[in-house]
Amino acid sequence: MNAGNLGKTGGKAMNAEKKKQTMNESELRFIMQEGEGLKIEFKRFFDKSIVKEIVAFANASGGRVFLGVDDSGRIVGCTLTNKLKSQIQDIARNCDPSVKIGLEELEKVIIINVEEGKDKPYKCSSGFYLRQGASSQKMKRDEIVDFSISEGKIKFDSQINNKFNFEKDFDSDKFQDYLTRANLSKSIDNKTILKELGAITDLKLNNAGVLFFSKNPQRLIPHSIFTCVLFRNKEGSEVIDRKEITGSLVDIVEKVMEFVEFYVKVAYKFTGKPQRENIYEYPLEAIREAVINSVMHRDYFETGHNNILKIFPDKIQAENIWRKPIHFKLEETVFRRNPIIANLFSRIRFGEKLGSGFVRMKEYCKKEGAPTPKIKFTDIHFYIKFEPNLEYLKIAKTTPKTTPKTTPTTEDKILALTKENPKIRKEEIAKQLNITIDGVKYHIKKLKKKKSMEWKGPSKGGHWKVIEK
């Protein structure tokens, strides 16, 4: 047992104002013998420098200061007068923000019980301190920034992006597409709408706005790329296809799902009805939810890695760089690392800002007869693994001739729409396929290059012609 463990025994002491004594003589003697540690600090007498220890414990996991004890653990004594009690309470109250403490006295030792803070970081007049080992260390600027990020006090999506230039970088087509998806009419000027959406901070576009509405988000935020990989083997050593997905966050979600849908297989279930039922190899809606969550809750302060989606012969795995929040618990579904990004997605019905993505993934899997996704996280990475639908495996095993068959690509769908309605506009194609205008333009350009379709007549009043091969 060490001094760090002893901190746990003092949990009840946090309510010392209600309960005068929570420590017995035996425990006190043991702590004196053990000495100072992560949660234990000895002070021979009271002085105002004690505020450093109080702030350091509040910024860590709590602790106790023993007044009337020298560095060797020898009790020299200290009396808790009303004046001293008021001084200690004033010191804790004047921290920024205030620190909750409890006081008790035992054998002429004053014990200051400091709770772990719920509103970190805490500071005193001389700066920010953090308990490290048996001492309280003053934090440097970069340490304070990292600490604030880990505590969720500094949000990436609300930070102003000084590289963004409205005239050069703002994409009016993406913006209009977003308003269309969100069913918002453009009755006021762009900057006012962006402000209402939370994409502007202090009259400048923030990182959330850049990731949604800039012409080239990766020029301004290079690490916002999403990597997709298809492997030949289960070990992931043989790559068949790899794509670096770029564009706005909406573009990225759609392009990642195009990659998935292109390689996911489908089996056909004949039910006796005129139309057969398609049974997909994987729960596509659940995977889509995972992709949305990965770009929504990614730790964008970490610039060394991309989000990745890997397709193996027996599973699909999404890997997210996210830096686990200190107070995060998987069973608590409400979590918003980037609240502005979450809100922008929610407005176009990409996920929900309430943070219930894990619940929806499980529901989608249950609905499609797929195993519950397996979730694993470390301090840096977040993994979600999807296994094939059980119904698909059953059909594929009994009717191998009907599988595998890839689902129609976005280009196939565009050809079908233009063949059905030669005068269809790009905006209508985007709406029906639930992709961006830029996405439609991208695929039409490819189809024209392949000589699969062409536009006949003037720009206004003309029509599409699908070229049969």
Image (tube, rainbow, N blue to C red):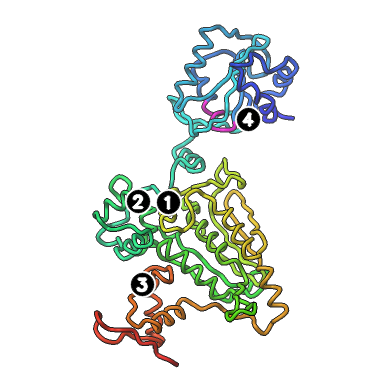
Find the distance from the CA under tag 1 to the CA under tag 2: 8 Å
Between discs 4 and 3, the one toward the N terminus: 4
Q: Quadrant of residue 113?
A: top right
Counting from the top left corner in percent of width and height, residue 135 is at 58, 28
User: Residue beneath label 3, please?
Assistant: 428
The type of residue carrying mark 2 is Leu
Q: Nearer the viewer, mark 3 or mark 2?
A: 3
In the image, 393 versus 225, the foreground residue is 393
Q: Residues within 10 Å of mark 2 (few under 14, many from 20)?
A: some
The type of residue carrying mark 3 is Glu
Magenta residues, as a range?
Answer: 55-61
**Which label was assigned to residue 282?**
none
* 36 versus 204 height, above or below: above
User: Residue beneath label 1, please?
Assistant: 343
In contact (CB < 8 Å): disc 1 and disc 2: yes
User: Residue beneath label 2, please?
Assistant: 197
The type of residue carrying mark 1 is Asn
**Which label was assigned to residue 38?**
4
Between discs 1 and 2, the one toward the N terminus: 2
Q: Nearer the viewer, mark 1 or mark 4?
A: 1
Q: Nearer the viewer, mark 4 or mark 2?
A: 2
